[in-house]
Structure formats: C-alpha cells, structure tokens
Image: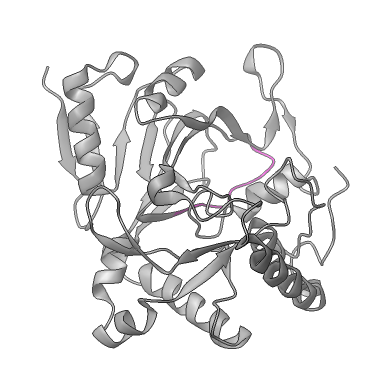
C-alpha cells in the first residue's frame, strides 16, 4: 500500500498519516514523512502500537536523541507494565506533569533546544488527557506589521524554574543534573526555521525577562503573543488519544500542551525527544560569558515570584520528593 498523508480539515497545519508502519518504515517513506513534518508541523500516526525500542528507532531517524522512550505518566511502572501505583500530586514528577499543561516548546531551557519530539500512547483515560498543538508560524504571519517590526529584534530568557514558579508556585531544588539547573537561556522571540526558512513566534511558558523592557512590559508582551497564537481555532489542534497512536511534531515552530484529566486514572505515553542541531538551536553553554546574565535575570525573577506565587497551586513551596 502507498502511504497516505491527509491534511487535517479546518486547520492551517497538521496531517494524519495512514498505510505506513513506523517500525519498518522504508527510506523512501521516511523521506516523505520528513518532508510532511516540515510542511504540516505535526503528524498523527494512528494504530502504530510501537514498543519502546521501536519508538526510539523511529526517533533516531531524525537525529541524536535528547532522551528515549521515557514514560510520561502519572503512575509508577509495575510488573509487566501494569502502572498500578498512582503518583502523588505533591511530588516533583507530578508537578512537572502539571506544568506541561501550559503552552510550551521543548527544551528551550537547555543550551540546545529540541528539533522535534514524538509521543506514543500506551494507556489513556476515558476522558481528558488530550494533547494540544498550536501553529506559531501561522500566529506570526497573522501579526500586524507594526507588531512584527516591534518584536523582530527582541529576545527572552527561558527557564523551567521560572515557568514552574510562575504557573504553579512550584520552586524546585536547584540541581545541575536536572532541568532545574539555575541557568536561563536567551532566545529570540522570532525564530527562522533552519530547514524551511519560515518565521514563527518562539514564545512559551518558559520565556521571561525581555532585555530592554520593564518586567511588566515583558510579562504583558509574552502573554499577549502566546494568547494571540492560540486565539484562532484554525491554529490549534487537540488530539484525543487512542492506545497505539503516535504523534510527531516540530519543536522549532509549534507550541504544545497536555490537557487535564482525572489524575486518579492512569495515563501513560512514551516520549522521545530529538536534539536540535547546534548550528541553529544553540543559545550558549553555562561556561560561556553570556550565561552569567541569564543566571542573574533568573535569580531576580524568582525573588519576585516568591512573593507573588502564594495563591498558586503549590503556594510557593518545594516538593518533598
């Protein structure tokens, strides 16, 4: 059978791919999948039922992996993948999961942000727990000329410590071996895609502290830009998971988020994330001179948030585990 790629109706992005098996995809079909990803921004592959190793092997076709087939789950894995023990919402792991329910782009809080990522559904709740994506290319194209001119030279720092504190009142312990490493990476608000040349807004929950603007101006502008991207339903897609589905998206031009669900019910997705190319996705390394400004900006911002986050979900606290 010939692989079928069908655009998603009433959306400006996204496609569903059928009549292909990702576990044994040919070089020719992979070339077409790669081209479709660049064109549509994300691809849905129904009924793939990939194993962990198959999820990893497919991800590796796009480049070196940042991580491989990690379970994005609210439950601990038991014997034979039972996932019967629900994880406490007060743990850092679940605080991170809840943070992912805000619009974001993967790994902008690292020296090298992500190229693309995929999720494969293993267990899903009957209601909720969907994944939404938003087209930041179309969002940028729809901006007024004056706004595009205003933001074209602006940048913002990115930190997951900021986003956890800002969105949830969660203040993780700083640890260089985690994503809560005390660094903040400066990235432009407007990104030019390294393969297509198309511009998009590069803003999400991790972004803060635009140099040259006051704190209030920065917060208002970033909030306005994210809200603008998702304000038109043709730019937003919600994927209702079925066991066996695989979803692939381009982190260089899309936003995404998880949707809430009953956390007493099990939700398990295996996630694989592909590293970005340093030529286009590197901000700087912690040892570089530019990094000190990011650390200072983050330290100042977290002091403000300590005072402001008392009424958020975790009330300016740190997880016990």
Q: Residue furthest front?
A: 289
**Magenta stretch: residue 257 in it?**
yes
Position of residue 177 measured from the top left corner of the image (x, y, whole percent): 73, 40
The quadrant in which residue 255 appears is bottom left
Number of labels in the image equals: 0
Q: Is residue 56 above or below residue 11?
A: above
Position of residue 37 measured from the top left corner of the image (x, y, whole percent): 26, 41
Decide if residue 61 is on the left or right side of residue 195: right
Q: Main secondary structure of the magenta part?
A: loop
Point 12% across, 17% down: residue: 1
Decide if residue 181 is on the left or right side of residue 173: left
Position of residue 182 measured from the top left corner of the image (x, y, whole percent): 73, 56
Question: Which colour assignment does the render follow?
Answer: one colour
**Magenta stretch: residue 107 in it?**
no
Q: Is residue 124 above or below residue 24?
A: below
Q: Is residue 147 above or below residue 63?
A: below
Position of residue 100 measured from the top left corner of the image (x, y, whole percent): 58, 52
- Quarter of the C terminus within the rendering: top right
Point 55% across, 63% down: residue: 205
Point 44% across, 76% down: residue: 154
Magenta residues, as a range? 256-265
Decide if residue 192 is on the left or right side of residue 202: left
The quadrant in which residue 225 appears is bottom left
The quadrant in which residue 60 appears is top left
Q: Residue furthest left?
A: 2
Point 75% across, 65% down: residue: 169
């Amino acid at each position: 059978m010939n692989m079928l790629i069908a655009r998603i109706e009433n959306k400006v992005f996204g496609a569903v791919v059928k009549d292909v098996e990702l576990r044994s995809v040919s070089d020719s079909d992979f070339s077409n999948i790669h081209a479709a990803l660049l064109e549509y921004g994300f691809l849905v592959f129904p009924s793939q039922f990939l194993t962990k190793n198959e999820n990893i092997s497919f991800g590796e076709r796009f480049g070196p992996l940042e991580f491989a087939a990690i379970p994005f789950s609210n439950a601990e894995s038991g014997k034979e993948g039972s996932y019967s023990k629900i994880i406490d919402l007060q743990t850092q792991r679940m605080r991170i999961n809840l943070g992912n329910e805000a619009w974001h782009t993967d790994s902008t809080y690292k020296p090298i942000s992500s190229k693309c990522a995929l999720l494969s559904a293993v267990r899903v709740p009957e209601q909720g727990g969907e994944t939404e994506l938003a087209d930041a290319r179309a969002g940028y194209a729809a901006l007024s000329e004056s706004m595009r001119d205003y933001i074209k030279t602006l940048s913002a720092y990115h930190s997951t410590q900021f986003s956890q504190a800002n969105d949830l009142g969660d203040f993780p312990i700083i640890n260089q071996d985690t994503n809560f490493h005390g660094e903040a990476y400066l990235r432009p608000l407007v990104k030019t895609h390294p393969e297509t040349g198309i511009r998009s807004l590069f803003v999400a929950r991790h972004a803060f502290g635009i140099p040259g603007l006051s704190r209030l101006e920065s917060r208002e502008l970033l909030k306005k830009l994210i809200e603008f991207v998702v304000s038109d339903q043709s730019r937003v897609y919600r994927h209702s998971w079925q066991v066996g589905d695989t979803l692939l998206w381009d982190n260089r031009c899309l936003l995404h988020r998880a949707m809430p669900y009953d956390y007493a019910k099990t939700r398990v997705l295996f996630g694989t994330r592909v590293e970005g190319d340093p030529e286009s996705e590197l901000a700087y390394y912690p040892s570089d001179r530019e990094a000190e400004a990011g650390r200072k900006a983050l330290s100042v911002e977290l002091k403000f948030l300590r005072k402001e986050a008392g009424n958020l979900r975790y009330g300016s606290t740190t997880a016990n585990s």
